[in-house]
Image (cartoon, grey):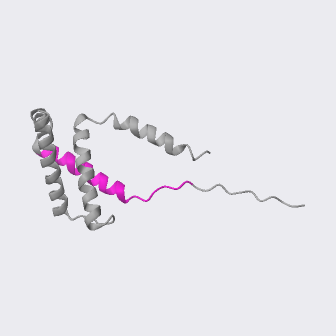
Amino acid sequence: MNYQNIGDEDMKLSEEFQRLYPDIYSVIYPEIEKQCNTLEETKGPDYIPSKDELEQMTNAIYDQVNIQLSRNMKQDVVARRYGRRGLRDIISIILIGELLRRRRRPYYPPRQRRRRRRLI
């Protein structure tokens, strides 16, 4: 099996799935990335936030998302669709997923063993 092309195939597949997310994801995810980057810079990459810290991060993201949505006049549509608590829950779920994703160890495919030549 050729493992060199797997990364390219995974990237294409990932990009295709990214397009399937609802529009709100493109507003939420960049804010989540900013919060996670800030957390990593201040506390380190292996830091696990407490429930209170996670709630504070969610609140900060929620506030930023509301600002962006109010600029685009989509705030009413999102409020009707998800509700305030629903949007916070969505943010928390994506945030926890991103924190977990950043802590996964990278996958390295198995090495192919070289066959030894038998000398006769």
**Direction from residue 107 to residue 74 in the image, left or right:** left
Q: Position of residue 17 (x, y in %)?
A: 37, 37
Which residue sits at x=29%, y=62%? 40
Residue 58, compared with residue 17, is above or below; it is below
Question: How many numbered marks are there?
Answer: 0
Q: Which residues are magenta?
A: 85-109
Between 92 and 102, the one lying in front of the other is 102
Give percent across and percent down for residue 110. 58, 56
- Where the N terminus falls, by quadrant? top right
Q: Quadrant of residue 100?
A: bottom left
The single residue placed furthest to the right in the displayed view is 120
Q: Nearer the viewer, residue 65 or 89?
A: 65
- What is the x, y in percent for residue 79? 10, 37
Residue 46 on image: x %, y %: 33, 66
For the C terminus, the quadrant is bottom right
| Prevailing secondary structure class for the magenta stretch in the rendered image | helix
Q: Residue at x 10, y 43 (%)?
A: 84
Specify the quadrant of the image occupied by residue 87: top left
Seen at 27% across and 54% down, the residue is 96
- Find out whether residue 97 is within the magenta segment: yes
Q: Going by the image, does 69 lie left or right of 95? A: left
Residue 47 picture quarter:
bottom left
Nearer-the-camera pick, 86 or 111: 111
Residue drawn at (24%, 34%) of the image:
23
